[in-house]
Amino acid sequence: MLYSFINKLRRDVLKRKKEVYLDRLVQRGLKLGKNVEIIDTFFFDPSHCFLITIGDNTTICPNVRLIAHDASTKKSLGYTKIGKITIGENCFIGDSATILLNVTIGANSIIGAGSVVTKPVPPSSVAAGNPAVVISGTDRYLKKISEYRKSKKVFSKDYYIEKLDEKKRSEILESVADTIGFIV
Ligand SMILES: CC(C)(COP(=O)(O)OP(=O)(O)OC[C@H]1O[C@@H](n2cnc3c(N)ncnc32)[C@H](O)[C@@H]1OP(=O)(O)O)[C@@H](O)C(=O)NCCC(=O)NCCS
């Protein structure tokens, strides 16, 4: 009881801290669309955040880094490279992806986990790797996954971690024994 109260309090404090921090970035010029979901930790180049635009309905996974400046020339030449980062609407930026300056990611695109994006990504593309390259179109990717899902069970919210018992855990483990599975 006390443990869950403290946990909730901790979550609330962290959530509020994140909101305050994001508000400060927005005040300093970060253009944040509506309904942008930012999961957990992030780095939106605080000293150059006014160069960054994130479109409506985009999802930013944990540990994403948007780096709008490059001080690799600072000591030798006396100045730093800067550039815009523009992420379109309805994008999904995978866990720990890094997006460098002077990059536009077109609407409806997906960036793979751990990618380093150095070049523009056309709209409706799936790009991944270091450096990130287009590996599919978003429609083709979604069609592939939908086709695959037809032969698999999609586990409901009753299978979320807090509701798992031994039986449910085994069901999921069986479903992913040698391939991927699905959960809402
Ligand atoms: C990019 C992504 C959407 C592609 O999904 P997919 O098409 O089902 O992936 P596949 O496993 O079929 O891989 C297709 C090819 O892309 C490569 N690839 C997939 N994801 C990659 C990634 N993140 N980085 C580099 N290469 C990747 C695979 O190695 C494979 O290459 P090959 O054709 O040479 O064998 C997915 O791999 C991904 O990274 N999703 C994000 C996951 C995430 O961030 N989760 C956070 C919690 S929501």
Image (cartoon, rainbow, N blue to C red):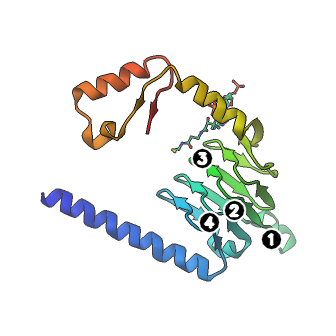
Residue 172 vs residue 57: left or right?
left
Q: Nearer the viewer, mark 2 or mark 3?
A: 3
Give the label on residue 94, or none.
3
* Residue type, mark 4 in image: Phe
Q: Nearer the viewer, mark 4 or mark 1?
A: 4
For the point 50% across and 74% down, the residue is: 21
* Residue type, mark 3 in image: Gly
Instruction: Report the Cα–Cα distance between label 3 and label 1.
Output: 28 Å
Residue 154 at least partly seen:
yes
- Under circle 2, the secondary element is strand
Instruction: Report the Cα–Cα distance between label 4 and label 1.
Output: 17 Å
Residue 70 vs residue 23: left or right?
right
Q: Mark 4 vs mark 2: which is more N-terminal? A: 4
- Under circle 1, the secondary element is loop
Quadrant the N terminus occupies: bottom left
For the point 79% across and 58% down, the residue is: 103
* Residue type, mark 1 in image: Thr
Instruction: Report the Cα–Cα distance between label 4 and label 3.
Output: 15 Å
Query: To which residue does mark 1 refer?
Result: 80
Q: Nearer the viewer, mark 3 or mark 1?
A: 3
**Residue 40 x %, y %:** 46, 57
Quick check: is the Cβ at mark 3 less than 8 Å away from ligand 1? yes
Farthest top residue in view = 178
Farthest left residue in view = 1
Farthest bottom residue in view = 27
Q: Dot 4, crowdedness within 10 Å: few (<14), some or many (≥20)?
A: many
Does 63 appear above or below 27? above
Quick check: is the Cβ at mark 4 less than 8 Å away from ligand 1? no
Q: Dot 1, crowdedness within 10 Å: few (<14), some or many (≥20)?
A: few
Q: Nearer the viewer, mark 2 or mark 1?
A: 2
Q: Dot 3, crowdedness within 10 Å: few (<14), some or many (≥20)?
A: many
**Residue 30 x %, y %:** 65, 74
